[in-house]
């Protein structure tokens, strides 16, 4: 049994106006899902704490807006350095509160830091464009200006990466920013703030408000908050988008997923098994880009399904700080119960469990909430399970006669976060890329996560809004465009 560093149970503060402050609210425990140990207590902030954070952000905004972009990004260079120096501490914190493996925690930090690096190029990204002589003697220019106070509401499953999808771009564009992290994984967010504080960032440019729905509603309703970035389940994404936009706010809300993976008979069996298994069972299936449904086309059902089941059974499940472990715990006992109930529902619908991960027990971690990798064969395409997000290490295999039939399945799904194809045929790959209605497409890849300089492009019920996270979309989201049309008649010129 690997021992986690033990720490006295700490009441996590908020970070408002450059100070770590205790919240005058109730608190709830944050648990290590592998051991059930209480790691900290998180405040359930409400309108009063949100009001303080918005006031601090609004007070910091005028001076921050006047700070040249080239000066603003100096804090990001320092931040990048501090994130690198504290990578181990951050990765351990993620594993302890989220359950994923240490290697997965390092991986998510790398993807988060990439966004800090990209946002450090803001002086260039922020540039507008211009046209001279749109009419005789008249010029037109487009400039970008920050919005003001903006906020992000983030989920439990990537406690570092997802805040970093938003924070660096928002502040480099000249906004002031409030983070409301998941109340199930708030420790990492607190560490991210401590490192930000160490950069010397002016007070109020970034604040952290811990909590749940009450804090979210207060941010959505606050008239000074101009824009909301959200990542979480579809039901909450739809709600946040509706409530924010009804009050005239700009919103980008990423929702849930049920990612289909199409395996053609000519796919490389060894590579496909390794990649699909990592996608489906890595992060205990709690990744919005996890493979969830395998559409095995023709012969692939006979050749691929049994080797996937073998890979599922071979995976080592346990506490994420144990270097051997490949699949960590799921986040809570409620999640474990929900996942197990969905496996049972699939079996009731007629699926055959080739690997059944229910009632998983890990020696030395009897209090942990584990689900072993599960493969359900013959899940009916029209059934409930084929459409329901499980968010656990479970793959449903559906037989398809042709590539066209598999694409038709992908396209009737309500979610559209990611769809993948495994094949050695360029023509099939092109057809899939062209026709599949999902925003992130993987060809011989199982987690088609866009790099920071591309947008994270969920579609359908996986995204509400227009401008996505990351890259140029982030710059558009966090700025207003202003167009200036100018005439300076020659007759007015003096001789100097
Ligand atoms: P969640 O929807 O329960 O919570 C997300 C955030 O919303 C948290 O900060 C939470 O405190 C807040 N919240 C929860 N219920 C609320 C309510 N009723 N009103 C207002 N705010 C509320 O999601 P989660 O369980 O933390 O994360 C898992 C979900 O996130 C999965 O559905 C997963 O697919 C999705 N996800 C999507 C992406 C993506 O890029 N599309 C990325 C990661 C996770």
Image (tube, rainbow, N blue to C red):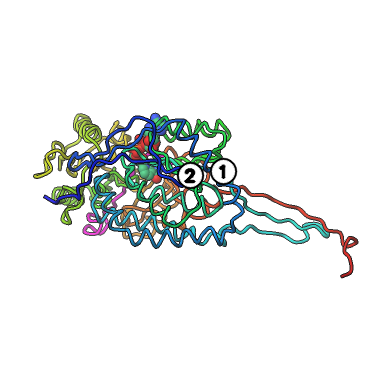
Q: Which residues are magenta?
A: 254-275
- Using the image, determine if residue 266 lies above or below residue 393: below
State the image quarter where residue 33 is shown.
Answer: top left
Q: Is residue 346 left or right of residue 487?
A: left
Q: Is residue 495 left or right of residue 407?
A: right
State the image quarter where residue 370 is shown.
Answer: top left
Q: Nearer the viewer, residue 24 or 150?
A: 24
Q: Quadrant of ligand 1?
A: top left
Secondary element type, mark 2: loop
Q: Residue 257's x, y, as percent?
A: 36, 41
Q: Is mark 2 within 8 Å of ligand 1?
A: no
Q: Are marks 1 and 2 in contact (CB under 8 Å)?
A: yes
Secondary element type, mark 1: helix
Q: Nearer the viewer, residue 430 or 115?
A: 115
Tell me the distance, in whole angstroms, between the alpha carbons under discs 1 and 2.
Answer: 9 Å
Q: Is residue 145 left or right of residue 230?
A: right
Q: Residue 472's x, y, as percent?
A: 52, 55
Question: Is residue 235 shown to the viewer in this render?
Answer: no
Q: Nearer the viewer, residue 379 or 194?
A: 194
Q: Quadrant of the C terminus?
A: bottom right
Task: Return the disc, 1 or 2, that comes first in the chain's sequence.
Answer: 2
Q: Is residue 5 magenta?
A: no
Label 2 CA crowd tier, 10 Å (few <14, some 14–19, many 20+): many
- Give residue 17's mark: 2
Q: Which residue is mark 1?
A: 59
Question: Is residue 320 shown to the viewer in this render?
Answer: yes
Q: Is residue 256 magenta?
A: yes
Q: Residue 249's x, y, as percent?
A: 56, 37
Q: Nearer the viewer, residue 102 or 377?
A: 102
């Amino acid at each position: 049994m690997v021992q986690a560093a033990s720490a006295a149970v700490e009441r996590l503060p908020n970070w408002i106006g450059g100070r770590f402050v205790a919240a005058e609210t109730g608190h709830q425990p944050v648990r290590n899902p592998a051991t059930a140990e209480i790691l900290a207590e998180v405040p359930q902030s409400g309108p009063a704490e949100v009001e303080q954070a918005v006031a601090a952000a609004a007070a910091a905004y005028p001076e921050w807006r006047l700070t040249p972009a080239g000066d603003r990004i100096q804090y990001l260079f320092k931040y990048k350095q501090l994130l690198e120096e504290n990578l181990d501490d951050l990765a351990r914190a993620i594993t302890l509160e989220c359950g994923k493996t240490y290697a997965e925690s390092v991986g998510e930090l790398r993807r988060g830091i990439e966004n800090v690096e990209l946002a450090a190029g803001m002086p260039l990204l922020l540039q507008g464009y211009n046209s001279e002589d749109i009419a005789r003697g008249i010029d037109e220019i487009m400039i970008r200006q920050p919005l003001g106070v903006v906020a992000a509401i983030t989920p439990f499953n990537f406690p570092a990466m997802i805040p970093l999808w938003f924070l660096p771009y928002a502040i480099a564009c000249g906004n002031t920013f409030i983070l409301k992290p998941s109340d199930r994984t708030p420790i990492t967010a607190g560490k991210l703030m401590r490192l930000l504080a160490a950069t010397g960032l002016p007070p109020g440019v970034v604040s952290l408000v811990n909590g749940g729905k009450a804090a979210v509603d207060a941010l959505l309703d606050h008239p000074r908050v101009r824009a909301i970035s959200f990542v979480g389940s579809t039901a909450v994404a739809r709600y946040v988008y509706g409530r924010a936009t009804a009050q005239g706010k700009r919103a980008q809300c990423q929702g849930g997923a049920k990612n289909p993976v199409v395996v053609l008979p000519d796919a490389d069996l060894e590579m496909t098994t390794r990649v699909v298994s990592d996608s489906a069972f890595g992060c205990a299936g709690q990744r919005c880009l996890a493979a969830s449904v395998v559409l095995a086309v023709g012969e692939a059902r006979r050749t691929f399904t049994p080797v996937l089941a073998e890979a599922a059974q071979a995976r080592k499940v346990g506490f994420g700080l144990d270097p051997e472990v490949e699949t960590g715990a799921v986040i809570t006992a409620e999640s474990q119960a929900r996942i197990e109930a969905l496996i049972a529902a699939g079996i009731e619908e007629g699926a055959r469990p080739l690997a059944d991960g229910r009632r998983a027990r890990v020696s030395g971690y009897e209090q942990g909430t584990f689900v072993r990798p599960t493969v359900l064969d013959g899940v009916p395409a029209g059934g409930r399970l084929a459409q329901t997000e499980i968010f656990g290490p479970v793959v449903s295999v559906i037989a398809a006669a042709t590539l066209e039939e598999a694409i038709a399945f992908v396209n009737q799904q309500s979610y559209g976060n990611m769809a993948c194809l495994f094949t050695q045929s360029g023509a099939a790959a092109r057809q899939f890329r062209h026709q599949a209605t999902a925003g992130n497409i993987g060809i011989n890849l199982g987690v088609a996560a866009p790099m920071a300089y591309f947008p994270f492009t969920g579609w359908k019920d996986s995204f509400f809004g227009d401008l996505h996270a990351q890259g140029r979309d982030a710059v558009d989201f966090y700025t207003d465009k202003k167009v200036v049309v100018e005439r300076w008649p020659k007759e007015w010129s003096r001789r100097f």
